[in-house]
Amino acid sequence: MGSSVEVRKVGEEAKLKKGWFLAYKWLILRRFSQVFIIGIFLLGPLAGIWFITGNLNASLILNTVPLTDPFLTLQVWMSGRDLESQAVIGLVIVLGFYLFVGGRVFCSWVCPINIVTDMASWLRRVLGLPKGIDLSRTTRYWMLAVVFVLPAIGGQLYWEMINPVSIVQRGLIFGIGISWVAVVMVFLFDLLVSSDGWCGRICPMGALYSLLTPVARLRVTASWRDKCNDCLDCYKVCPEPHVIKPALKGESLGLGPKILDINCTNCGRCIDVCAPNVFEFAINFSDNSRISL
């Protein structure tokens, strides 16, 4: 019961000070982004409006602009297959975008599985469940290596047969069917086995996208860290809480206010729940100047 009371208080001060919308703004925008992306893919098969064709792996906007997922492209390349010029163009476009905003933006703003894992994390806190197995954060990088090595050996895209992201999107387009199994398994894993385990410890897609983050210009930044009142709400809602401390408490160590850890998903929840408004999204430049968003 004590844990439930604690969860209800997370972000409560922010709601009182900033109002309900500003205390959930980035969460609402993320959910809108995820639902919107799913929706535009469904417009074609359900309503005959083909704004975009394909799926999250490979798509074409207005039959003109290609978009290709780096994760799938590397699997195809490792399998020994030739890459079409359109796929390469789509890869460059997507890579350019994620190199600017940070690769793990895919995890928090695009991936439909994020909705499932966020729900499991919320329910785990409400029920006061223990965190479960603490898997190493390097596990997903070993998974990533396996995902790329297997196509090189067998010539097939083995991961795509069980990839929850691909399964769920195919299910939404062609009928949910077995997709529910993937959703339920990921949900139960995060709820009962390992807290934030799928996205933070297992998913090889997240591992690859994290490697695109070091040069990203868009960062969550603790611009007003001197206002921090140590409420810890940001740590409680962050799926990767270890990324916060260097930016928030590192001034005495000469560390800047930008969250630089490649595991940060740029989800913005720390901004939402912070009553003193310590955090913000900012586009950072090499000369230490930045544009606040």
Image (cartoon, rainbow, N blue to C red):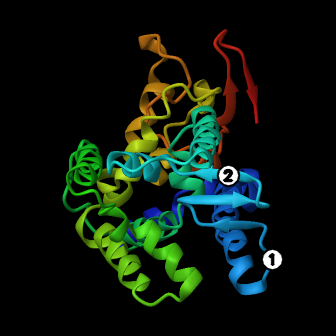
Other-residue count near label 2 (Cα within 10 Å), few / some / many at <14 / 14–19 / ≥20: many
The image shows residue 272 at horizontal and vertical percentages of 64, 50
List the residue tagged with mark 2.
66
Taking depth in this image into account, of 184 and 172 the one nearest to the observer is 172
The image shows residue 54 at horizontal and vertical percentages of 62, 67
- Give the residue drawn at x 57%, y 48%: 87
Going by the image, does 61 lie left or right of 231? right
Going by the image, does 69 lie left or right of 190? right
Residue contact at pointers 1 and 2, CB within 8 angstroms: no
Mark 2: secondary structure: strand
Mark 1 or 2: in front is 2
Taking depth in this image into account, of 205 and 6 the one nearest to the observer is 205
Mark 1: secondary structure: loop
- Give the residue drawn at x 24%, y 42%: 138
Label drawn at residue 88: none
Q: Amino acid at mark 1?
A: Ile
Gap between marks 1 and 2, in whole Å? 18 Å
Q: Quadrant of the N terminus?
A: bottom left
The image shows residue 285 at horizontal and vertical percentages of 67, 17
Label drawn at residue 49: 1
Q: Amino acid at mark 2?
A: Pro
Other-residue count near label 1 (Cα within 10 Å), few / some / many at <14 / 14–19 / ≥20: few
* Residue 275, image quadrant: top right
Q: Quadrant of the C terminus?
A: top right
Q: Is residue 248 visible from the viewing direction of this image?
A: yes
Taking depth in this image into account, of 288 and 158 the one nearest to the observer is 158
- Give the residue drawn at x 36%, y 83%: 181
Taking depth in this image into account, of 243 and 85 the one nearest to the observer is 85
Q: Is residue 279 visible from the viewing direction of this image?
A: no
